[in-house]
Image (spheres, rainbow, N blue to C red):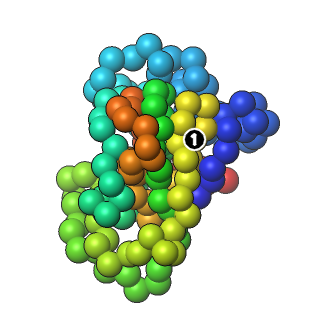
Amino acid sequence: MLYSEIKHFRGNFSACRALRLALDFLVDQAPGLPDGKHDLPDGMFIQIRHYEPAPAAGRRYETHVRMADIQAVLEGEEILYSQPLPEGALPTEDHLADRDLRFYDQLSDRNGYPLILRPGVFSLLLPADAHKPECFSGVGKCRKAIIKIPVELLEP
């Protein structure tokens, strides 16, 4: 898991082409996109959506296997909880075949790191990072961008 301000990270870590392309797109083009899924180069894509954050107790931890996430709030604010996926944790729902998504009901926020996502901040979540997004922070409606990056593009 990586959590940073885009302005501090962007341009300073240009060794990873996919990450550089994703952050450049996030800053330069994502704010003007309509809601929905938009394809990017090399099998990456971005999802833009409006939503109402929910209480953390009503959200679940999730992981992905084939894709890493860059999550960034374009408008509003949310809390995203993240924690290393515990060894031996078993998913309570498995949607890997069609959505590259697993849910874990047994993970506790006591072991999670609450990250505040607001405009200008992003989190990079890898397959070993369980995360619970879109939790209410006290601010209402949000607009969010999630960039999906095939994990092989992040390998050296």
The reply to whether residue 65 is visible in this rendering is no
Q: Which residue lies furthest to the top in this view?
A: 32
Locate residue 22 relative to residue 5 in the image: left or right.
left
Locate residue 150 relative to residue 103 in the image: left or right.
right
Q: Which residue lies furthest to the bottom in this view?
A: 88
| Percent coordinates x, y for residue 98 in the rendering | 20, 53
Residue type highlighted by circle 1 = Phe
What residue is drawn where x is 61% and y is 31%? 120
- Identify the image quadrant of the N terminus: bottom right
| Percent coordinates x, y for residue 46 in the rendering | 40, 32
What residue is drawn where x is 30% and y is 59%? 59
The reply to whether residue 106 is visible in this rendering is yes
| Percent coordinates x, y for residue 80 in the rendering | 47, 53
- For residue 35, which quarter of the picture? top left
Decide which of 135, 41 is in the foreground and name it. Answer: 135
Q: Which residue is denoted by mark 1 in the rendering?
A: 122
Does residue 151 lie above or below 93 as drawn?
Answer: above
Q: How many labels does the image show?
A: 1
| Percent coordinates x, y for residue 40 in the rendering | 44, 27
What residue is drawn where x is 39% and y is 29%? 143
Decide which of 137, 79 is in the foreground and name it. Answer: 137
- For residue 113, which quarter of the picture? bottom right
Answer few, some or many: residues within 10 Å of disc 1's Cα (few below 14, many 20 plus, some between 14 and 19). many
Does residue 37 lie above or below 122 as drawn?
Answer: above
Decide which of 127, 151 is in the foreground and name it. Answer: 127
| Secondary structure of the residue carrying numbered label 1 | strand
